Image (tube, rainbow, N blue to C red):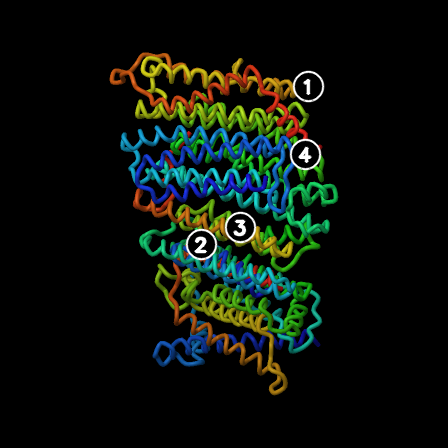
Amino acid sequence: MFELILAALVLPIVIGLITLPQKKLATIRYTNLVGSALTSGIILAIICKITEIKVFSSEFLYVDYLSAVLLLVVALLTFTATLFSLPYMEKEVKEGHATEKMIPRYYALLNLFTFAMVSVLVVGNLGLMWVAVEGTTLASALLVAFYFNRSALEAAWKYVMICTVGICLALLGTMILYYAQVNAGGETQALNWLYLKQISNTLNPTIVKLAFVFILIGYGTKAGLAPMHTWLPDAHSQAPSPVSGLLSGALLSCAFYALIRNIIIIQGTIGTEFIHTVLLGLGILSILLAIPFVLIQHDVKRLLAYSSVEHMGIIAIGFGIGSHLAVYAALLHIINHAIAKSALFYLVGIISQEYKTRHIKEIQGIARVMPTVATMFIIGILAITGTPPLNIFISKFLLINAMFESKMWLLGGLALLLLVGVFAGLMNNCLKMTFSSVPEKMKQANVSPVALTAIGFSIVLMIVGGIYLPTFISDILTKAAEIVIGG
Amino acid sequence: MTLLTVLLLAGAVLLTRVSSLRTAVGILGFQSVIVALACLIFGLKTGEFHMYIAAVLTAVIKVGLIVYSLWRVTLQLKHEREIANFNVSFLLAILAIIVSYGFVNKVLPHMAGETLGAAIALTMIGLLMIIARSQAIMQVVGLITMENGLYLLGLSITKGLPLIIEMGIFFDILVAVVVLVILTHRLKYSFETTDTSILNELKG
Amino acid sequence: MSVLFMLLQVVVLAVLAPLVAGVIKNTKGKMQSRRGPGYFQVYYDLRKFFKKDNVFSPTVSWIFKAAPYIYFATALGAAALVPTLLFDRGLHYDNIFVLIYMLGLGRFFLALASLDAGSSFGGMGGSREMFINILVEPVLMLTLFTVALRANGTGMSQMASASASSGISLSAILAAIAFLILTVAETGRIPVDNPDTHLELTMVHEGMVLEYCGRSVGLIFWGSALKQLVTILLMVNFFLPWNPAGSLPPVVWMILKVLVIAVVLAGIETSTNKMRLFRLPGLLIATGCLSLLAIIAM
């Protein structure tokens, strides 16, 4: 097991290092495809092993069911991202947005990013988890600034600044938590998650509460919770589309994972009431703040980015309700959102490549120009707004169910209303894009089959997930929910 | 130790007044040297060996690599000047010092070590610089000041984090500065200036 | 008995104030490669002024006529209150606030009177003086608080004896530097204000008193010289109270220190130029920061 984890960490770095000095694009493509497939395979193997041995814990590594849920997300997403990057970046070079010299750098950074994300999920030490989360910011910053044009630089600068400031606050919170640990006499295994969980009820509640506030602000900035989400639309819209999909789907979820790990310890000390209230508040605020921007948006990628903010709000509400059903729904939502949002970002990538613009008003008539893409786009939009029988509907439904089960009538009603608003905005924009008349200069476009496979894979997962959730996954989710609640 | 605290705070408050980028980076270097000295003194007081290593690491990475790379960048940004309302930020910095010492004295009187108030003040002044300054390098200086403050905070309330986490944090800050320096170079290349107040295109 | 000593102190300080002003002028002159006006020139100037008549503009009210007297009276009062640790005055009301705000009262009336004569120079000088005063006063109080904190009280004799018994520390050095800058500001020397000029662009205190002549201007000159001596004495007694042991009696050391401070002031005046008026807040906030650091370092 330890070897598997080590392989999952080392393989991306090796592939990245191999890619960097390469000149022939074909070799780069094949190495990365194979490498990414291998990495995802290894991660899936880790997940299978976890279902057998339940927990793996060594001095610095710690993997359990909760990590398994997010490892699944990362495995799926990195594979589809790499698969989609192959034709996408090729076309970008052809169109002139990128030069051939930039491509090795792109793939190397992509692998570094994968490594950083996997390392967040497998470390068992809160301090090292902090280091890994900051590492993901830095690895993705150069990807956001990849095209090095004005908007990309602006987005990258804001991204690095805001996220690093937020992460510094999280460091402050982690240090205060360590101080609480030292006070309770347990400084030998500093910030070890398992150990902290055992002694969590001996820690000083005031200190831990103070730590919680800082940790929430810090990791919440990284996870895209309002009001710290201001970097999100810029960064996710300016990055290349495969990277946007990874950022929205995997990175936000990893940040949430770090937050949840800290919360599991904190709720052992100060109880769940304060934590849940704050999470619920931030969740509702995220949805509230996302809605007006979704409704009046011009740029299609920013539209999807604000939708990510809204979905992160939903996940926060799920964790904020705290019942077993709610946490199960939130974890399921993490997986579903990752699959759906990444597919949407890839689709929008193809569309904006064809139409050479990201403005919604100028993208018209996708149905005539690229029929397959249009179908998948409609399925994706239906999924992201929570329409049955697609996967996000299941998790949203379970979440609202949990809200009403926990007797939060007002909150449930409010959430339903807000989600209707988002549905209206997204559908309005996207139906206009798909079914209107074609602008004159667009003709029928050919889309690379590789790209379509990458997206089709996610679409199939979405449809299957909406109809039938395999027991294997449901099992992992249930056990992970138990871990979060504090079993 | 009192001398170090006073020098740290004086340097930090002075940071809010400078308009030349090179002076700011110089003051930052001075500040990092003092933080390394403070770590050394803590090590001498508590006798823990890993603090010496941490002090050396601080000196090498924070003073050496980071300040050196920032210095190199400012050599290319000869014509950039920071224009801001200095008196307001100076007053806010002094207010930050008062607030942090007041906070430490009222809320945490039992742990009022000498450097705790200074550490919190340093963090707040760093945050102030990131918010109130528009030059790219000044924002990076503010970030490093904030990290210095957090490091000093860790030193004051615990005996420093375990060495491997410290090394991870240092490495992170180093990579962050590298990334920011790359971005600053690109900013200069694309926009002809590193004044971030012109980065206002992405709205809504 | 102590009342007698107090009167003696007032008379001595009033008599010696022009001498100190003369020392400063002479030192400045010598530093600027001139001969300087002579140590007793200020006495001759005062005698000249007292022989002349008062000329008042027709628009003035009683404030204009009374202001010089009020100013001089407050300066005398301040001279009475200054702690010199030479004798026990047994006062119960020698609070630092009384001294500072007495001086402030004098300045207030002078500023009012500057508006009274109806000339634009007066108004300009008065408003600038008040602008500087708004900044100087809180910082002055903050710096004096560093001494008060050490003495656990604001009675001036208490503060003076507490300063005398404490050693040289970082906090004391910082406070001394801060108060030196404040002395420059309070006495209206370069870089805050130019006491020699009569050009409208550069005058603050001189602009305020431009409309006076004769006996009134004599009183004002004497009053400001006295105020200067009081501020220097505050500096010496609160912030530089350390005497080398034995040898000379403390009176002699105090006189020596006053002379040294006078020379230092002259040196500062010669070496810098007058600061732009709107850069003064920066200087004064920096001074405030120094005193804050002095409090922290305590």
**CB within 8 Å, label 1 to label 4:** no
Q: Amino acid at mark 2?
A: Ser
> Is residue A298 at least partly visible in the picture?
no
Quarter of the image with the N terminus of chain C is: bottom right
Q: CA distance from mark 4 to mark 3?
A: 30 Å
**CB within 8 Å, label 2 to label 1:** no
Q: Are marks 2 and 4 on the same chain?
A: no
Q: Residues within 10 Å of mark 4 (few under 14, many from 20)?
A: few
Q: Are marks 1 and 4 on the same chain?
A: yes
Q: Which residue is mark 1?
A: A405
Return the chain for callout 2: C
Q: In the drawing, does residue A396 fall left or right of residue A348? A: right
Q: Which mark is residue C127?
A: 2
- Disc nearest the viewer among 1 and 4: 1
Q: CA distance from mark 3 to mark 1?
A: 43 Å
Q: Amino acid at mark 3?
A: Ile
- Residue A55 position, x and y percent, is 65, 36
Q: Is residue A181 above or below residue B46?
A: above
Q: CA distance from mark 1 to mark 4?
A: 20 Å
- Which quadrant holds residue A405? top right
Q: Is residue A470 above or below residue A83?
A: above
Q: In the drawing, does residue C163 fall left or right of residue C14? A: right
Of residues C284 and A391, which is closer to you in this image? A391
Q: Which residue is mark 3?
A: B169
SS under mark 4: helix
Q: Which mark is residue A363?
A: none
Q: Amino acid at mark 1?
A: Glu
Of residues A425 and C85, which is closer to you in this image? A425
Q: Which residue is mark 4?
A: A274
- Residue A346 position, x and y percent, is 41, 26
Q: CA distance from mark 3 to mark 2?
A: 54 Å
